[in-house]
Structure formats: structure tokens, C-alpha cells
Amino acid sequence: GQPGGAPDPVRAALPVGPRLEGGVELYGVQGCRHGSSMPRAGRLTRVPELVSVVGAALIRDGRVLASRRTAPPRLAGCWEFPGGKVEDGETDQQALVRELREELQIESVVGARLGPDLVIGTTAVLRVYLVSAVGVPQLVDHDAHRWLSGRELEQVPWLPADLPLLPVLRHHLRTTER
């Protein structure tokens, strides 16, 4: 909450879903055109070792970069926050700088987290960060990029794992436009 007991507007914008220990949100992953499925929290007895995945909410001029995937086939055509897996020995921030250098050929500075941890299926956990960068994002692992305002976020079919972050991102974009 906020000072004085007022609800936090960013938290209030997040959809409510089942949670694992530590408040980790659960969201399933399927193709972006077919919706997503949510595992039931009651069916999980212990938390498996999850692969850490990081994504970049790359902000420039009041817009966020969305990148369209080309693979795997079930996710091709879906839009995402660019990023990738955290390798052994890397921090989230180091992995995101590396991934953006490889995927977009840009140099970046990683800022604050955007939203909670999001579990992808049963194998990975996604953490998205606000990012600023120098350079023009190149098409290396994606076939298109779009700079979207808060009002344009729903104009593309996002990966199901990224969807819960759109209300928080919209709020962030709205507050930074002022």
C-alpha cells in the first residue's frame, strides 16, 4: 500500500492470479492467439528449479519497444519484451545487457523492475525491467519492432506471459508522459 493506507495504483492494476510461495504470480504459456491456461495453485506441491528469463521494457520518448518473434512456430508472430535466459553466474541486469546487445545490437542501462515475477508454464520465471538504451534496435532474432504508446499496447498480440504487465506498463507510460 501507499502512505496513509491508500491502495497502490500499480498493484491494483495487476490481474489477480494464483500465487506460489513468496508471491510469485502463476501464468501459463500457449500460443498468443490461443489464450493462456493457468495452472491451479493447489496442484503444485513443491516449486521446481525454474530457469530465470529477463525481459526489457525499453522506453523511449514515452513509448515501449515491442518485438515480434519468429520462433518457435507456436509463438511466431507474437510480440514480446526482448530479452532471454539468465546464464549461470550472471545477474538479471548483466543478462539483459548481454541479450539486448545480441538481439537488438544496442547498449542499454537496466533500471527498476516492472511488476512481479511471472512464472512461465512450469519451467521458467520472467522478470521484466525498465530499460533505456542508445542506438537503433536491429532485427536479429525478431522480424519486426514497434514503438507503442500506452494506448497502443493492445494493438499487437502479446505473449501470454507478458500480458499481466501491460496495465503496470500503461500506468508507467502515463506517469512519465507528464
Image (cartoon, rainbow, N blue to C red):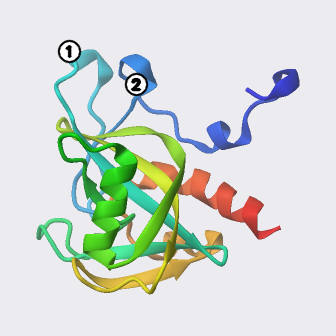
Q: Residue at x 17, y 41 (%)?
A: 88
Give 20 or 97, whichever is nearer the viewer.
97
User: In the image, 60: left or right of 140?
Assistant: right
Q: Residue at x 12, y 67 (%)?
A: 72
Give 90 or 51, whichever is nearer the viewer.
90
Spot occupied by residue 170 in the image (x, y as percentages of width and height): 63, 60
Using the image, determine if residue 51 lies above or below residue 69: above
- The amino acid marked with disc number 2 is Arg
User: In the image, 21: left or right of 33?
Assistant: right
Give the tally of numbered discs.
Answer: 2
- Extreme-left residue of the structure: 73
User: In the image, 132: left or right of 158?
Assistant: right
CA distance for labels 2 and 1: 12 Å
Reading the image, the residue beneath label 2 is: 19
Spot occupied by residue 56 in the image (x, y as percentages of width and height): 43, 60
Quadrant where the image shows the C terminus: bottom right
* Crowd rating for badge 1 (residues with CA inside 10 Å; few <14, some 14–19, many 20+): few
Task: Return the mark for residue 46.
Answer: 1
Using the image, determine if residue 161 lies above or below residue 20: below
Quadrant where the image shows the N terminus: top right
Q: Residue at x 29, y 26 (%)?
A: 40
Q: Secondary structure at mark 1?
A: loop
